[in-house]
Amino acid sequence: MNERRLQILQLVNSEQRLPVKHLAATLHVSQVTIRKDLAFLEARGLLRREHGSAVADQGDDVQGRMAMNYAGKLRIAQAAAALVPSGETVMIESGSCCALLAEALAAAQRAITIITNSVFIAERLRPFQATKVILLGGEYQKQSQVLVGPLVRQSASAFFVDKLFLGTDGFTNAAGFSGKDLLRTEAVKAMAARANKVIIVTESHKFGRQGVVAQFAVDDVHSVVTDSALPPQFTADLRRSGVQLHLADVGDDGKQTKEERP
């Protein structure tokens, strides 16, 4: 994913639809080059091509949400991937940042095993032969492409891992971490029961919001991986609670992170 393709994604998501000729003129490259870039982005499910234009694909599913602020989410995912040593087995729950984390681990070819309840993640990792994927059983939620219900708990009980990575829909000091879907939240709690460390991987704008379902108290969370736009009050509150922070620099090239420890 080069810088020009990231720019295309940002422009298309901002305007919803842009002609190929407009993108070529804006980025000072040929229309042939733009069409190749759009084919690459479309193959990754980040936009659609229609009648000589690029169209944002902003559905509520994981793939649609992944295209929003793709570069920022990729930085967060890369920061989270740095926490996983070669050969480790980890659990990863569904979500756009988590899907990019799983892909980053697989692309590094470090013999990682990923246990997940996300059909989307399992399918996305199909090209990466060096990465072993274990898909937990359960009831299939078609929109979110995750498996939920009692079978997730039963399947997860067969494993024990050091780290579970998951997203969140919100955090407030009063409510802790929260979600929007009861069944998904129950599934991730079952996965958390089999992990030493619960690691939240999310964008900073989720902080200050509150979902409708209690997810985790702050004391239950080992680390948070987010971007450096995290408001200072939450940085201070999380550090006081003993949570380790890994902050991907906003506007950076995606390789640098800074870590704050309590």
Image (tube, helix red, strand yellow):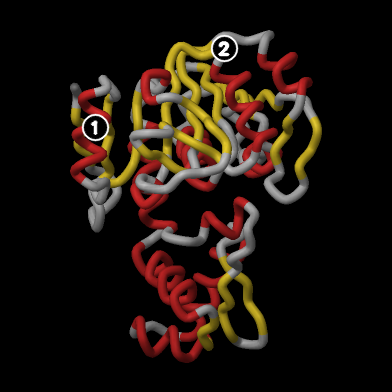
Tell me, for residue 32, which label it has, or none. Answer: none
The residue pinned by badge 1 equals 237
**Image quarter (top left, top right, bottom left or bottom right) of the N terminus:** bottom left
Tell whether 229 sits left or right of 12.
left
The residue pinned by badge 2 equals 194
Residue nearest the viewer, comparing 79 with 2: 79
Tell whether 175 sits left or right of 35.
left
| Distance from the alpha carbon under mark 1 to that under mark 2 | 27 Å
Q: Is mark 2 on a helix, strand or loop?
A: loop
Above or below 22: residue 39:
above
Total residue callouts: 2
Disc 1 marks a residue whose amino acid type is Asp
Disc 2 marks a residue whose amino acid type is Arg
Q: Where is residue 132 in the image (x, y as percent from the top left)?
A: 62, 24
Asked which quadrant contains residue 116, the reply is top right
Asked which quadrant contains residue 114, the reply is top right
